[in-house]
Amino acid sequence: MAKLAINGGKPAVPKGIKRRWPIYDGAEKRALIEVLESGRWCSRLNPEGRVAEVEKEFAKLVGTKYCRAVSSGTTALELAIRACDIGFGDEIIVPAVTFLATATSVITSGAVPIFVDIDPESYQISPDAVEAAITERTRAILPVHYGGYPADMDRITEIANKHDLFVIEDSAEAHGTEWRGRKVGSIGNIACFSFQMGKPLTCGEGGAITYDEEALDVDTFSLTRTMKTPRGEKTCYLPTGNWRMSEFAGAVLLVQLSRFKEQTEIRHQNGEYFARELEKIEGLSPLKRDPRITKQGYFFYLFKYDSAKWNGIHRNHFMEALRAEGVACGTAHNEPLYQNPIFRDIKKSYLTVPDVDYASFHCPEAERIHENEVVAMLNHVLMERKSVDQILEAIHKLRDNIDELKSSGSEVKRNSRTRGLRSLVQRVANNIAQV
Ligand SMILES: Cc1ncc(COP(=O)(O)O)c(C=O)c1O
């Protein structure tokens, strides 16, 4: 009789992993009602309001002199690029593996993203690849702390200093992550964060930039305010959109901030536990455990699958079997971005990108990892130790029944990302329904 759920057996986690996110209570409700009843919903007209407070608190948390709260992580990125006065024809080096907005915001700022490979140990931008990609047009390096794991900020800073480049940290997924005791978002010249609903700190939609240099503050401040001050001074120096955060979002975020430290610690401890347990399982491993990472925040929990040690069973088949056991997983946004039609077919679009043929890009590690190795889960599984234990139980079940897994007739498709994501979304939807 079949033991594995993929063959009709009973799933290890019949109801799926419980999703505890977003977390809120009466404090958020009261904060929202207060803003509602105050009649002051707009942050521009409320300089002492919730958004102003968020800016103070978030700067303190990250350890920078300044913070500006904006409407999303995408606008934060655009703002950060423009604040550095980077634009037409300038090149920005970005990792091939990240969320689309990292690279599209470079384009919407008028600059050119140059994709480079990732480090196979950490899945983060490879400093060697960065160095090899520098040209006379390069103005900035845009490391992404992908999944919450920090990029190698020692090497990135060294390379940037040597070549006089800006470092713009995309910390959209890495709230709370520390590199040598410093929060990411405080190490480069300027950084962006996202507070979209799946992020470890959220107000539904929102973002922020953090930085220390006053020169960036002047530009950034003017860019977030598109109208005249009450005294009639013009504060907008460049044509731009309205990227402000509303007081409602600020109110929710302030309460969420008060829970953040404890939640980060829970994710960190459960992430460490997950890593130690994965190390004991043949053919699976966590990302490199680097002592320079003094605290790890998470957007995804990413780990590595080695099919050679699973009797040649393809990673996609392993994930399919794991999903059948009740554990949502996929490859997250690991597809190298130059393969995405936005970039691959960019010459057919209205966007003007000087002389770059993304279809000819090739980052071997990024491609190999996406096709065969990475397994990703949403960070919510780290909110409870029980969830990690359930995932481990399901994985052990597959390992203990490896012959059945190998012989199970499911067709292995080399790239089942779409299928994987659909299943992930479905599972998340199911989980929401259960909470
Ligand atoms: C790495 C990265 N950069 C930028 C963004 C954009 O943030 P937002 O969705 O708030 O616009 C995201 C969002 O998922 C992200 O993961």
Image (cartoon, grey):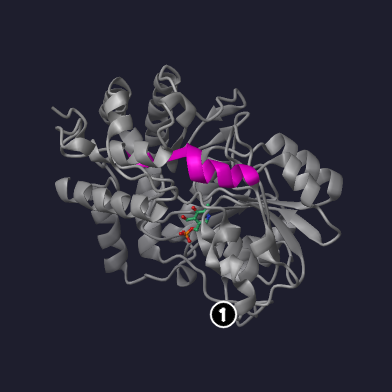
Q: Residues within 10 Å of mark 1 (few under 14, many from 20)?
A: some
**Residue 146, percent from left and from top:** 54, 44
In the displayed structure image, the side of residue 76 where residue 280 appears, left or right:
left
Callout 1: SS: loop
**Residue 39, percent from left and from top:** 32, 72
Q: Is residue 306 at all visible to an observer of this figure?
A: no
Q: Quadrant of residue 34?
A: bottom left
Query: The C terminus appears in which quarter of the rendering?
Result: top left
Q: Main secondary structure of the magenta part?
A: helix
Outermost residue, top side: 280
Say whether residue 64 is magenta. Answer: no
Query: The N terminus appears in which quarter of the rendering?
Result: top left
Q: Residue at x 37, y 70 (%)?
A: 40
Q: Nearer the viewer, residue 215 or 90?
A: 90
**Is residue 429 placed above or below 267 in the rendered structure?**
below
**Residue 299, percent from left and from top:** 44, 43
Q: Is residue 295 at all visible to an observer of this figure?
A: yes
Q: Residue at x 20, y 50 (%)?
A: 430
**Is residue 303 placed above or below 38 in the rendered structure?**
above
**Residue 283, percent from left and from top:** 45, 24
Residue that mark 1 sits on: 227
Say whether residue 369 is magenta. Answer: yes
**Is residue 303 placed above or below 397 in the rendered structure?**
below
